[in-house]
Structures are given as structure tokens and as C-alpha cells.
Image (cartoon, helix red, strand yellow):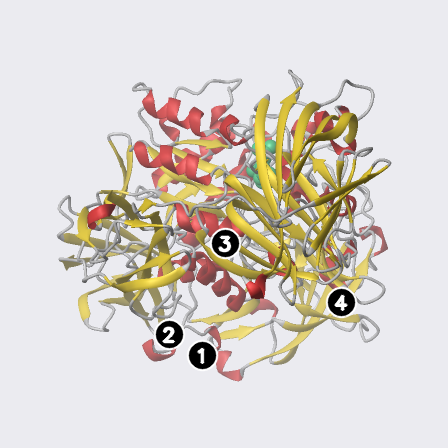
Amino acid sequence: MHVNREEPRAYYIPYSTSENANSGKRGQSPYYQTLNGSWKFNYLPSVKEVEDDFYKEDKDVKGWDDLIVPSCWQTNGYDQLQYVNYNYPFPCDPPFMPIENPTGLYVREFMVSDQWESKEKYVVFEGVNSCFYVWINGTFVGYSQGSRMPAEFLVSPYLKSGKNRMSVMVLKWCDGSYLEGQDMWRFSGIFRDVYMLARDKAHVRDVFNKQQLSDDFQKATLSCEIETTGPIEVTVELKDASGRIVSLGEASIDGKGSIPLVVNNPKLWNAENPYLYSLYVYASNEVLTFTVGFRSIAVQDGVFTINGQAVKLKGVNRHDSHPELGGTIPVNHMIKDLVVMKQHNINTIRTSHYPNDPRFLELCNKYGFYVIDEADLECHGVYSAGPFNILSINPDWKKSFMDRMTRMVERDKNQASVIMWSLGNESWYEVNHIAMAEWARNRDTSRLIHYEGAQYPRVETNPNEESLDLVSRMYASPAEIEKYALDDTNSKPLLLCEYSHAMGNGPGDLKDYWDVIDAYPKLMGGCVWEWVDHGMKTQTAEGIHYFAYGGDFGEKLHDGNFCIDGLVTPDRKPHTGLLEYKKVIAPIKIEAVQLAEGRIRITNRYDFIDLTHVSVHWKVEEDGVVVQQGYLDDSDVAPHTESIVRIPYELPEVSANRYFLTLTCKMKVDTLWCEAGHELTFEQFELPVERIEAVVEPSLAPIHVTQNGHLVAIEGFDFQHEFDLYDGTLTRISKHGLQLLQSPATFNIWRAPIDNDAHLKPKWLQEGYDQAVMRVYRSEIIEQTENSVSIGVDFSLGGYIKYPILHGKSIWQFDGTGKINLQVNVKVREGLPFLPRFGLKLTMPQGTEEVEYFGFGPQESYIDKQHSVKKGKYLQTVDELFEPYIRPQENGSRFGTEWVSVSNGQGMGLNFTSDKAFSFNAAHYTPEDLAAASHHHMLVRREETIVHLDYKMSGVGSHSCGPELAPQYRLEENEFEFKLVIRPVFKEDE
Ligand code: IPT
């Protein structure tokens, strides 16, 4: 697995003074020299093409390419961009790799400072995929594999004064690749930083800051376990966040030693208040610094706790994924992720499925995140070829498994944010895992051990069931986790290490999960799969930018858009699913107690901090217009407690209007991740005001009806409508001569399948849901007066081969004002899969761009994805309603709409209402357009506007990898009635 690699150690950079250490910038250290930059690079499709002398000192490499390090080959035009989930993109023949193994040769010249003359010099590679050999000045230095772990080599013997040359050979595949079969783009190369360190001959090699908190948290002891490379005086100093020394110690250490530090009344670290002390380790000319966050992580009576407090993990799975740089993640990009996460109330990150850059963990310490640090180990691919456990049970592979655990734990053992070690992902669970777990438990008693694969039965049962501290599940449904929580024989907390698969339009089940998680102490939360869509930014021949996914680069084996399953886009724009998550996991909950008297309950769901940093604004809106507002008095609600508050609004006893109360919780202060005024969460209630319905006088305006064959013309003072009896539908709606319908209205059940419909889609297609056309059995005028006319239609909607999907009876009543009252009664054939939706589809002419509605907004909402939207009056454009999913699919619907007007810019259009709230959307694409395009940029925007008025739209769920859509979110009624009022309007006159 390696040759000449140094033993793993904690991550640090040696500095010369505490001042330059405090800068946090590696370049401030005189003992650090980056080897990032421009390297000469030669890519060869096969290792057999490597020239024997390529690493020699005098090898002429002028003709080679220039490549920036760190980087990935595939994002620089070398090799092949390929996205594969768990299958191996090579024959499964462990430990062998294809002979045609792509290879990258790197050469770089660098100077070594004269001031380093007397020092020991090391080179550190923080990440190279998948394995590499290093030479300096033509002499072999060493070899390492294990892509996301640092490899350090002692290079003093090979360096000379003046110019030196480093040559590196990186192979795309090695036997380690069998353990790196994670669901991701397969990148290669020196993709993380490379640097040299100059050390005193006798120096501190490793530091393990072992912390222990007394049971009452009043005393913290820090045992600094220090390993040196020779006899040396070591002084340690612990400073609090203000820079005050709180404890110090010293010792002469030759080899291993320990310096104890004690802090009375320590300030504890947690994700909400990430209080950090700084530890300085002085030895000879060097100072090393470590942040120290005192916290205790435990399972108490089956409940997961931090600092003795039950904590729920509100997490995400995060891959290293950059839309242009691939697996190379600059620090500012890491910060961007953390800021967006913080702004969305996320407190936990699982570093799926490998350790990240060590600076990422330092940022997590500082910004406040709980991290599940996962070993770089997934051998899921063996499962496609044969038994799942062939590697995890095989003693020949034990060393490789252990290597991935020991190097991670040693590197990250001082990081406060790391609360759990994870043995990797989806590699079954056998003796090799148990060895990893047991080693880690022995080395570090302060963290928990996680592994999801343990749920599968083992061939060789190991009696030590205690190897893991918690039970971990993927994609279990809310009902399944509830069952676990209710079973008293389950003594460990349960973590959903992956849940609510955020692929495409979704997830729609977050609230259901959290209702259950919040109800049971044994459920410790979970991490949504996943944080980011791994789209690669690319462009068409015409220069149109788009985000590519599997298959877009002509790769033979790929897994399509299964990598486009994040809560944010590749360029980190929040999807609507993230807004939903933010609301569901919000740290403050507001409930109604007695709205007539303005009483509400505020619950502080933070685990450690009170609410003094939050200001709560309230407003009352009367039909969408603010009529009263104010701020609540500061409420100092302690964590995990609640307070009942009175809001001083005054309500009329009766009104024809509706009143909504909206409370918004905002940050009072600037933080690392937000500015004062940032909205943490909100809540909304309809206020109890007795409603006097406005009396609508029946229209006495006369109506003229003329029938010409199958066409019925319905005319009044300022309108002309037309109904086609043959097709059983409306063909013209016009006001003042303006035709508002471009093509006949149709009943519609189809939606462009979302990713979460993928499993159901074949059944939908089998029944012809995508082709359902109307068959009219009867269509006639059934009632006519001076002021109105009604047309009755019996129809069915059917696809092909099978019996019709549904039968319906519609009554279209026209009155003298131009209003159209539609009532449709539907019977769906028994035994069918639930309907995507049912509603009326209209096409409105070019120029129909304005949408005004009273309902939920401003973003899309569905029956199961509507916690992050606010009820109000919205004015948007058709384009603003659209959500540009990377793979186009149903989007932009508005659930719970009470009325909507869709018009041209002058306000001339159609107004829709119903007796019950309905869903609508308006777009420049039909469901068929969306379904036919594989990427957003391939959509051709129509000039006309397609409007859907839906009785119901089925929910979105997370079935692409999660449970089926819950029954309450499906349109699976066999009989229903839908009423819709269509009114041509000139809005500016109303
Ligand atoms: C699970 C994987 O752990 C994760 O890496 C990713 O592939 C995700 O699913 C799907 O997007 S594996 C699945 C078979 C449960």
C-alpha cells in the first residue's frame, strides 16, 4: 500500500511564531513551501507507454503540457469524464486492474531555501487519485495510494541546494480503486495541495489532544499526547477565544509524552456556539497550533447527546464537487457551502463518502457543524459481480481497510467538529470493518462509531455487536423509523445517514420525517442525500453553457442524471427542496394557542442557545395587504423550552376579507455566515374572523346563443365565447374582441415525470397516461335561459390498448357577464396507479406573461412540499414561475391557490377561482416539451403560455431512491368533483 510513507499524524502546519500561526495562512510559515502551481504534465492512455527514464533529472520535458496542480485530469481535457454510481468501470477482478491503465506524469522544478539547510524536509500530498510514485532528482522517494488521505515522505536525503526536480507518476487505477467505488465522477490526478515542510531535526511529530469533561461539565482536562522525533523541550499553552492563557504546561519529551492541561468552567463547543480555544505547542523553533473545542459526545439511555443535551442532527451528505474543478475544492468554495448550509439551518455534514480536505474540518469547527467523518471506503461494485462481502471478509484486504481508517482518525483526531467516525459506505459488514471499528474505539474514546452497512447479515457473526454506537439506516420510511423507536428492545439511537433523496423536484417527505424524528428521543435525525447536484459545467458547440451529467461525454458506462440529486445546483443556488428543509428543521417553532386573543407558542428548538439573538416580526394582512405589524418583545426562551406570547393585533368580528398573521424570525446580529436581518424561519396562520360572504347577484345581462353545426357561439355585451360540441370543449374565450384561448381547452392528467416518478412512470405509460385523449359520448345544450346557457358533456380520457382511464361528466355554464362555470365529475377506473394530476389545460396566446395569484409563494409548492411557502398575493411572470431543473421535469406548480389571473402585460386575461383551493401552473412549455428534453438548455421556449388548473397535483416525494409517495399525497380518489370558474378580465378595471 505504500513505500516510505511516514506514519500518519494529526494535521498541522509548523509555524515560527504564534503570530504567523494565528494568521491561519500556511504561506505565512517560513517552514512551509507550496508545490502547487504549474507542473509539466504528460498524459498517457496506458501505463505501458511510460518511458523508462521519465523521472530522470535530465529528462527533457519542455514539450510536455502545463497543468495547474491541484487539479483533476478530466476537467482539463485529459482522459474521460465519467459519472458512475457504484459499478466498477473496469472488470471486477480484485486486486487486478486493467493493463491499459491511464497514467499522468508530472514534473516540477523548485528551489529550496538556504534557510532550510539544517532542517529535515518533508513533502506532503494531501490527495492523489488513485496512486502515485515520487522521485526527486531522479531518485525514487516512495509510493502511496488511498486517494483522499495525505501521504508524507521524508525527502531531505534527495534534495540538493539550488534547483531540484520532483517527478510524480499517477495511475488512474490501482487495487485501492476497488475500495473507492463511490457514487461520483471518477477523477484522477494530484487533486489536493502538495507542499513541503521544513522541520527541526528533533520536532513534534504528532499531537493528540485528548479531552475529558467532568460529569457536571465544570472541568475540562486536556491531555496533550505528544510524539517527538528526538529529545526536545515542549511547552503548551491553551488560550481562550480572547487570547487569554487559561492553562499551560511543559515537558521534556523524547519519543512519547503527555502534558495535562486543566480548564475550570470551560466554555463548551457546539454547532450553535462553536467556542474554540487555541492550543499552541512550542518546541525548539516551531510552534504548532490546534483549535480545541470542548464537547462530550455520548449515547445516554439510547439517546444521542452532546454536552449532555439531546441533539438532533439536521444534516446533509456532502461530496467534494465543483462544477468546473471536479474534486478539487478551493477554500472559498468550501466556505460558500458552509455559509449556504448555515443559512438553511443545517447543523451536520456527513463527508460522504471519504474524508475532505483537512481545512474543511477546521472551517466546520469555526462555523459550527457536527461532522460525520467517513473513511474512503466503498466496495459496492463487487455486489454487481458477485457476493457483496468478498473484500470485507477477506483477510488479505484487512490491511487496506485498516489503512483507510487509521489515516483518517490520525489526521482528524483533534478536530472538534468531528463527532463520529464512519467506517465508509455500502461495503457490507464483515471482520475487516469490525477491525476498523475496534481499532478506532481503542485509539479514540471520545467519539461514536457509525456504519450503515451493519444492518446486513454477516457470514461470520462476530460476537462484538458493540462495535458500533448507533443504528444507521438509508432511505427508511418515516413509518419504519417510528417502528424502530417504538421497539423497546432497540437500545441504540437511530441515524438516517441518507434520507429524502433530493433528486429533481423534491423532496416531499421532509416534514413527515421530522414529525417522527421530533417525537422520539431515540431518533437522532439524519442527512439528506445529498447537498449538491454534481453537474459539470460545460458548453455546446454553439457556446451555450449547461450542466452535464452521466452520458454527456460519450462514456460507455454511466448512471445518467443520478448525480443530479442535490439540494443546491452545481453553482450552489438553493433548490426549492432546500428551502423546504430549512423550514422543517428551523430552530424556532411557532404554534397557535388562541389566535382570537393573539396568543402563540414559541418553542426554542436550539439545543444550546436562547433566543436573544432573534427578533420576531409580526404582521397581519387583510387579503394580502399589511394592516397591522410590530415586533414581539425580546423573548429569552431557553433551549428546549417554550414561551406563550401575546401579539397585540386587533381583529374585526366579521369581514368579507381574509386575515393572515405572519411571524418572521430574523437574526439581530451579523455572524460569520449571515448579516443581521437574515430570516431563520417564519410561521403563518389564518386568523379567526367570521366571514360574511359577499352576496353575488345573479347576472341579468342577456346572452345570445347561436348554434352552427357542432359550434355553439355564446355572446354577450363584451365577450364572444365558443364551444365545440363535437370535441366537447371550449374553443374560444374572448373579451372586447381579444381572443384569450389559443387552442381548445382539454382535460389533462399528465405531468412531465419528475425523477421521483421514475419507478412509477413505466406503469403510467403502460396505461397510456401520457397519451390520454378525450372521447366524447354526449355533448349538448342542457339548459338555456335569457341570461345563461349550460352545455353537458359525457366523456372519457383514455390512452391505448386498455379501457379508458376515467369517465367524466362536465357541465359548462356560461352567463351574461362572460363568466364560465365548469363542473366536472370524474370516475377513475379501479385498480389503476394513482394519477399524476387532474385538471384543465389551456393554451393562452403569445404575450400572456403576467400571473397574479392569491395562494402560496413565492416559489413552487406541492401538496407534500409546501412548508416553506407563504400564503399571500403574488405578482410574477410566467418565467418566474419556472424552476429550471437540470433535467427538465414537472415544476413550478402552486399548491393551495385561491384565485389566479393570467394575463398579458396590460392585464387582459383570464381569472380562475374554485370552491376549493387548487393547484395551478403557467409555463412556456408543455409537459411533453419538458419530458422530451434531457437538459434544460435543450428546451425550446414557446411563445404561448400553457396554463394548468388542477383539481389536484400528486405530491413529489423522494421515491427516486426513497420510499413510495405516501398515500395521502397521491391523487388516488376514484371519484371526485372539480369546479372552476373562468372569467375573462381586464384587471386594471377591476
Ligand atoms: C446510496 C449511496 O450511499 C449514495 O452514495 C448514493 O448512491 C445514493 O444512494 C443514491 O443517490 S445507495 C442506494 C442503493 C441506497
Image vertical order of residue 477 relative to residue 360, above or below = above
Kindly identify which numbered label has been placed on residue 857. Answer: 3
- Real-space CA distance between mark 2 and mark 4, rounded to the nearest whole angstrom: 34 Å
Displayed quadrant of residue 759: top right
Which amino acid, mark 2?
A: Ala
Residue holding disc 1:
28
Residue located 30% across and 47% down the image: 689
Residue located 53% across and 49% down the image: 899
Kindly identify which numbered label has been placed on residue 846. Answer: none
Which amino acid, mark 1?
A: Gln
Label 1 CA crowd tier, 10 Å (few <14, some 14–19, many 20+): some
**Depth check, front residue: 413 or 846:** 846
The total number of labels drawn is 4
* Mark 1 CB near ligand 1 (8 Å cut): no
Question: Where, quadrant-wise, is the C terminus in this rendering?
Answer: bottom right
Q: Earlier in the sequence, mark 2 or mark 4?
A: 2
